[in-house]
Image: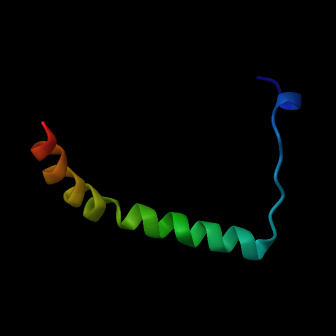
Amino acid sequence: MTVTDTQVTWLTQDAYDRLKQELDELIANRPVIAAEITPAARKAT
């Protein structure tokens, strides 16, 4: 892939802050989500 093959999406500071907050929340909740998925995955096998 070259630089000319990539697409650039420009964000406003507000949009960046909103997406960063959402990402931080998803990362913080990752252990909780994994704890909910693990028992269900074990039952499926």
Specify whether 41 is left or right of 24.
Answer: left
| Quarter containing the N terminus | top right
Q: Provide residue 18's location: percent of width, then percent of height.
A: 64, 74
Q: Residue furthest top?
A: 1
Residue at 77% in and 73% down: 13
Farthest residue, direction front:
44
User: Outermost residue, right direction?
Assistant: 4
Position above or below: 10 against 16: above
Name the residue: 67% across, 73% down: 17
- The residue that appears at 20% across and 58% down in the rendered structure is 35
Q: Quadrant of the C terminus?
A: top left
Please name whichever residue, 45 or 14, is drawn nearer the observer in this view of the structure: 45
Q: How is the image coloured?
A: rainbow
Residue 8 percent location from the top left of the image: 83, 46
Horizontal arrangement in the rendering, residue 16 relative to residue 41 (left or right) = right
Residue 6: give x, y in percent of width and height.
81, 35
- Picture quarter containing residue 44? top left
Q: Is residue 18 left or right of residue 35?
A: right
- Note whether 3 is above or below 22 in the view shown: above
Counting labels gives 0
